[in-house]
Amino acid sequence: ATLTPAETDYLLDMLKRLAEQGLAIIYISHRIPEIFAICDRVTVLRDGQRVTTVDIGDTSPEQIVDAMVGRELKAELATHRDEADFGDVILSARGIEAEGVNGIDLDVRAGQIVGLGGLVGAGRTEFIRAMIGADIRTAGSVMLTTNGKTKHLRGYGQAIRSGIAYVPEERRSDGLALTMSVADNITLPNRGALSNLNVLAPSKIVSFSKALAEKVGLRPPKIELLVGDFSGGNQQKVALAKWLGREPDVIILDEPTRGVDVGAKMEIYSHLRDLADQGLSIILVSSELPEIIGMSDRSLVMREGRVACELAASGATEEE
């Protein structure tokens, strides 16, 4: 899941060579292009049951996706918008420098989805963590403008209090407490809103958590279950829900669909577009080029800690 495109191509070519030498290979993946690139036959499982087995030449990616999710699913990503459709600049970063980050500027407007692409190791995660103060920033400034007021952000705590939310790349180790319940995880960044005189109010926690679980489409919507017992896609929904409870102005998502099945992935895409339509500013960090191209209104491509180029949504290609 973390290989670069070149490394992925090398792996797939190696598997093809091994198959030609007579090795039988079982390849388990929910990455549809890879299945069609190397497999002769595909079996689809859903809910512990075999749904279908078919020769790869007798099916299509759309049919495989429909079989995986149990219904017809149109994998339509966002309709891109022009710069004039967005609000004012909400987040403005200038000259951000940190370990592995070399003088990056970034502006994000209200209601805009900005994609941050590049190979693994290009400095994407290092940049956003330095920008919001989660890691040490050696130079640069960050301003957040909301309700006509501008704040200079100097640390992570201030960034969170000012209206920034951050869903990290490693949700299992950094974004969630797997041995705690859904309700407990949602409570963590929202304790102020769920307390009476600094004492957590159980009734508030239940109603608050249920509303957010329903909002992100958690399945099953049982807030008493441990987060570690949910699938990767549902864990990511909880990681998103806990921050939506704070009603942020800017949300940063690092690899939001890594290890997420195709059905949950489309749900997350749809939800992010709805949030952007409501005026939330989104920074989307991803190694998946179709995700960057399909979801972003504007894309920055990073290489070796710098912005190599900026691409408008219209006409952007994986080759570019």
Image: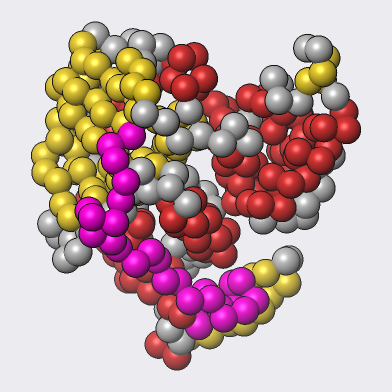
For residue 311, above or below residue 127: below
Where is residue 233? Give x, y as percent: 60, 51
Front in this rendered view, residue 120 or 201: 201
Instruction: Please tell me which residue is depicted at 48% across the width and 28% down the height of the picture.
Output: 163
Where is residue 249? Give x, y as percent: 45, 35
Total count of labels: 0
Q: Is residue 72 left or right of residue 164?
A: right
Please, which residue is most extreme toward the right here?
203
Instruction: Please tell me which residue is depicted at 83% across the width and 37% down the height of the picture.
Output: 206
Q: Is residue 54 left or right of residue 242?
A: left
Q: Is residue 183 visible?
A: yes
Front in this rendered view, residue 95 or 17: 95
User: Is residue 71 part of the magenta span, yes or no?
Assistant: yes
Front in this rendered view, residue 191 or 77: 191
Q: What quarter of the picture does the C terminus occupy?
A: bottom left
User: Is residue 192 part of the magenta span, yes or no?
Assistant: no
Instruction: Please tell me which residue is depicted at 43% across the width and 47% down the height of the picture.
Output: 279
Q: Which residues are magenta?
A: 63-90
For residue 66, above or below residue 193: below
Instruction: Please tell me which residue is depicted at 56% across the width and 64% down the height of the picture.
Output: 263
